[in-house]
Image (cartoon, helix red, strand yellow):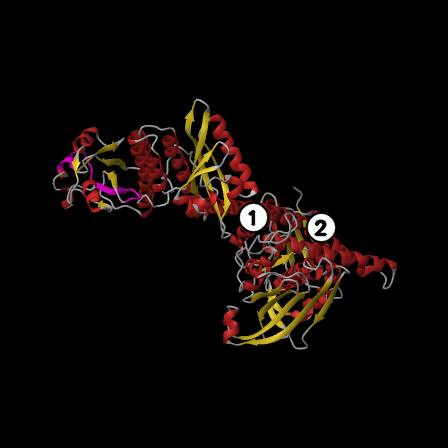
Amino acid sequence: MCDIAIESAISTRAVPHVSQASFPNTLIVEASRAISRYAAHQWVLEAMAMRLPLSQVLTRLALSIEDAAPGSLCAVMLIDESGAHVHTGAAPNLPAQYTASIDSLPIGPAVGSCGTAIWRRERVVVSDIADDPLWVAYRDLALVHQLRACWSTPIIAGDGAVLGSFAVYYRTVREPQASEISSVDDAVSLACVAIGQQRAESSMLVSEAHYRAVVETAPSPIVGLDADETVTEWNRAAENMFGRTRDSVLLRHFSKTCLESDARATFDRCFSQSHTQRMLSSCETEILRPDGTRRWVMWSMSHIIANDKGVDGLLAIAQDITGRMEAETALRRSEQQLRHSQKMEAVGRLAGGIAHDFNNLLTVIHGNTSLALQDSAKGSPQQMALEEVRDASIRATSLTRQLLTFSRRESVELQLLDLNVIVEDLRRMLGRLIGEHIQLETELSSMSMVVKADRTNLEQLLINLVVNARDAMQDGGVLNIVTSRVTLEDEAAAALELVAGPYVSLSVSDTGFGMDEETQARAFEPFFTTKPPGEGTGLGLATVYAIASRHEGAVNIASQPGIGTTVTLWLPSVPGIVATAAVSGEHPAQNGTGTVFLVEDEEAVRHLARRVLIAHGYRVLEASNGEEALQLWKKFGQTVDVVVTDVVMPKMGGQALVDLLRSDRPDLAVIFCSGYSDNTLLPMREDDVHTAFLAKPFTLNALVERVSRLCALSTRSGSGAYPALRIEP
């Protein structure tokens, strides 16, 4: 069992508690176990390096397992010189009377757990002492001390000699867990080294033969070094770890022979500290084996020979901690992603708030500009200036939509769209986005490219793909956008995790530096980016993937280093005709009748909406917040045909207000407005004809159209006579 690689048992005495609140559970458990094993290993090796009595070394070993397994009571039993009996080497917490009674316990085929384990040369697990035949002769002794379970593992040296056993008792009936067996195996390996060292030193302290026996049977790599760091000892475990034979390193300078420059500096500092101060020191370095593989090693160094002239040499014991380092690296990566995610969420909330305020301003700018255009002379400088202002407000609206998409507060409005139209509408902006050093080409299908999708999402997807392509062509190149209709057969559809059938495709190709296979495999991972720190969020392609999935489509990458990259999107093709909507030359809204209850905290937006509604024949009752609206409702509520309310307002929000109003009028028609364009928090059903949502910034025609549509459903239209009423707070 001494050949089992040492991963020392957990010792809470040697390492402080590690909080698990902020990290993923699996990584926390693995990292905590690795750190605790490291601490326990150090604690026991320190006792060995300081030449403490064997009983103290074994006591530390037993305590480390008891700390790792609460409720356990450990004992190390050693074979005496006769080879027929065992005596207690360490049992720090077993009852003293019980320990005295089992001293000189015989070795045999049915002598409890310890005597039997040594006899069989294998682990013996007794989960219930009261019922197990191995404990017939010792059952009463164990039960009187409330001991119910005992597992014993033989301690076997590398030459096959049995040195004793390591026993774990419990006061309850139980079976061992895999992690407990692993910890005990680690403890047995350490006990093997400690017992071997003690026996070698006690029989012949200066005997090279015994020293060699300890070193060669040790499961851990041991490197002996003289004062000049020349290798004087190199055991079999060191050969296995470093991939170098004893003859190839003996009498050579260790760090110059076996370590790279960075690791060499760390090792040399640790060596110098241990050598000059005659103290136990430790460090961690990476090693490069001759076959090119790398491992992480934890070193424990202590002086081993001393005379009147000072320290003559050092003993460096190595432990492979590659698994622990990989777990810590993964944990750090997870922490970075968590911090990045939290940062992005905070920026998203900020972006959403900014977009909300800008949408209120843009509603006022666009609305008043539209009103001014109606009164301006056609072809006049005033009309041209106003059109520039209107166009700027439209571009600003697009920017706020991107902010809302980034903050995940965008609404998803599925409609029939033509991919070719999307590309053409964005072509001019994309040309400015990529710069003059990149040539933009398009190959758009002559066939119908109709899909059911959210326009904002598709625009965001195309922009992200174009930006990625641009960044891959810093020295210039060609960016090509291609659309086509395809029919995916079963095999091709399955490869994309789609259902076979008709699809439309959108491909964005570049002539940039391309991606290798490893980068392609991770391209859609959130936060993964090949750009330098600070130049990329790693969310561009992840967002593309999310949008494709949201629309029941797929996306993939074809790329070759040095040639370029093509990203292709597939979306289900749907039958239908895309409705064309005028952007700036839309027809004036028709006049109507009815009373509109306008509740809006932004004064400029409220005044604009009131002006437009009155101009189109509606009576307007207005309030600046929910509480003020309730006062008006008590007096004039029965005259209202439709309520137009902002969602987010001080004192009382729009949803809370509507809930109270509909307790009086369940069928009350309501239009919710919001600068967040987020209707997901509102309890709106697709079949609810009495409720509508109007995203800010809205056009004047959109406001009048929704009011007209909902007023037509009201039986109260035309009642009342309140052209513009207002209650001052």
- Position above or below: 488 against 319: below
Can residue 510 be found in the magenta stretch? no
Name the residue tied to disc 1. Answer: 341
Answer few, some or many: residues within 10 Å of disc 1's Cα (few below 14, many 20 plus, some between 14 and 19). some
Farthest residue to the right: give it.
380
> Percent from the top left, x then y, of residue 49?
39, 31
> Percent from the top left, x then y, of residue 564?
65, 64
Amino acid type of the residue tagged 1 in the rendering = Ser
Report the side of 559 relative to 208 (left or right): right
Q: Residue at x 72, y 53 (%)?
A: 362
Can residue 145 be found in the magenta stretch? yes
Report the side of 191 relative to 437 (left or right): left
Quarter-of-image position of residue 215: top left
Amino acid type of the residue tagged 2 in the rendering = Leu
Q: Residue at x 45, y 49 (%)?
A: 243
- Position above or below: 75 against 543: above
Name the residue tied to disc 2. Answer: 361
Quarter-of-image position of residue 591: bottom right
- Position above or below: 12 against 690: above
Q: What stretch is highlighted in magenta?
A: 140-159
Answer few, some or many: residues within 10 Å of disc 2's Cα (few below 14, many 20 plus, some between 14 and 19). some
